[in-house]
């Protein structure tokens, strides 16, 4: 009997110890369960209003939400032009939307809304058949340090600030109105001499804005050179070309040079430099579609016969236009 009583007492002691040891674990589990009972996310309807760009038809749109506490932005992708419904953590946000369907676009410095930039990648300084001669082609005076970049494709963006996303005290629906952010320029060079003897030709414009700050609706400070293709008309008397750009003169008015590069049938290479600043800055022009018109480009006649040394690819010669004296 004594042994039985000691065994029962020992069981009580062991049970009490186990209860003391398990109590914190049981309490922690109960607390964790209570936390998961309260949801901190909410459905959010995102609407893209295209009244400012009715013809836009992007394949995809991206929404970036910037938390008020400064933590990393959250990105959401939409495959429908009109938007859709997503689930987001409740809180206060700033927002940016941009189309995300263009291969030439690069998004950089996106950790903060005010530095969010859409730009384009580097490219060769010459286009088309002249691209392989880009390394030796002279750059415009004053633009030697500018990057040569690809033309931007269509960009639409909008932003909003201090969105209180909460089902009870805030909003459960946001509307963003994307606007076109890329402009266009047409170039026309009339009375081009000896154009029928050109084997390849290319052009570029300097001093253009390098990107678009979608969170504050401003151009970036960087100035870049944009190469573009030009083509001859049927009569071989005129060159025309088109290019797209974010804008000219980022924040301070600058100089813009139009460069034309030509490879003639005899292998000689020539370049022509013209200041087109006044035309680009003309307040009478439509800033979304600028027009540059030049009159006269005297390409030299090719050398025929006679043999002799042929010029190398480094022999770029500048074309000068002698203006008549008044």
Image (spheres, rainbow, N blue to C red):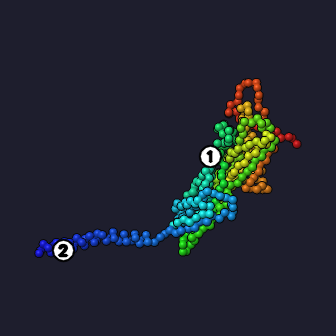
**Considering the numbered disc 1 on the image, is that residue within a helix, a strand or a loop?**
loop
Residue at image x 36%, y 69%? Answer: 29
Q: Earlier in the sequence, mark 2 or mark 1?
A: 2
Picture quadrant where residue 4 is located: bottom left
Residue at image x 60%, y 63%? Answer: 83
Closer to the camera in the image, 6 or 283: 6
Dot 2 surroundings within 10 Å: few (below 14), some, or many (20 or more)? few
**Considering the numbered disc 2 on the image, is that residue within a helix, a strand or a loop?**
helix
Is residue 68 rendered to the left or right of residue 56? left
> Which residue extends farthest right?
326
According to the image, label 2 marks what residue? 9
Horizontal and vertical percent for residue 70?
A: 53, 63
Residue at image x 54%, y 61%? Answer: 74
Q: Which mark is residue 323?
A: none
Picture quadrant where residue 134 is located: top right
Closer to the camera in the image, 122 or 75: 75
Question: Is residue 56 among the parts visible in the rendering?
Answer: yes
Question: Is residue 250 among the parts visible in the rendering?
Answer: no
Mark 2 vs mark 1, CA separation in Å: 83 Å
249 vs 139: above or below? below
| For the residues bearing labels 2 and 1, Cβ distance under 8 angstroms | no
Question: Looking at the rendering, in which quadrant would you find the N terminus?
Answer: bottom left
Horizontal and vertical percent for residue 268?
A: 72, 33
Horizontal and vertical percent for residue 278?
A: 77, 50
Question: Looking at the rendering, in which quadrant would you find the C terminus?
Answer: top right
Closer to the camera in the image, 98 or 205: 98
Horizontal and vertical percent for residue 219?
A: 66, 56
According to the image, label 1 marks what residue? 122
Picture quadrant where residue 47 is located: bottom right
């Amino acid at each position: 009997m004594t042994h039985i009583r000691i065994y029962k007492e020992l069981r009580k002691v062991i049970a009490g110890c186990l209860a003391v040891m398990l109590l914190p674990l049981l309490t922690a589990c109960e607390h964790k369960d209570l936390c998961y009972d309260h949801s901190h996310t909410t459905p959010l309807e995102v609407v893209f209003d295209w009244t400012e760009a009715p013809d836009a038809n992007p394949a995809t749109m991206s929404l970036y939400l910037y938390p008020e506490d400064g933590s990393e932005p959250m990105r959401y992708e939409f495959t429908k032009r009109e938007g859709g419904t997503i689930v987001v953590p409740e809180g206060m946000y700033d927002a940016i939307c941009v189309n995300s369907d263009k291969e030439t676009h690069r998004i950089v410095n996106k950790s903060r809304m005010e530095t969010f930039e859409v730009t384009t990648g580097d490219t060769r300084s010459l286009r088309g058949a002249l691209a392989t001669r880009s390394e030796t082609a002279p750059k415009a005076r004053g633009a030697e340090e500018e990057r040569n970049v690809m033309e931007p494709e269509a960009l639409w963006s909008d932003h909003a600030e201090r969105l209180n996303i909460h089902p009870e005290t805030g909003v459960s629906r946001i509307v963003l109105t994307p606007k076109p952010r890329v402009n266009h320029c047409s170039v026309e060079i009339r009375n081009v001499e000896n154009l029928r003897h050109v084997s390849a030709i290319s052009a570029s414009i300097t001093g253009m804005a390098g990107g678009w700050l979608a969170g504050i609706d401003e151009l970036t400070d960087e100035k870049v050179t944009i190469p573009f293709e030009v083509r001859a008309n049927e009569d071989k008397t005129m060159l025309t070309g088109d290019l797209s750009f974010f804008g000219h003169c980022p924040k301070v008015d600058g100089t813009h040079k139009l460069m034309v590069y030509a490879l003639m049938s005899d292998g000689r290479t020539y370049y022509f430099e013209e200041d087109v600043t006044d035309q680009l800055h003309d307040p009478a022009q439509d800033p979304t579609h600028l027009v540059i018109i030049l009159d006269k480009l005297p390409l030299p006649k090719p050398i025929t016969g006679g043999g002799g040394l042929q010029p190398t690819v480094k022999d770029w010669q500048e074309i000068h236009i002698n203006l008549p004296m008044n």
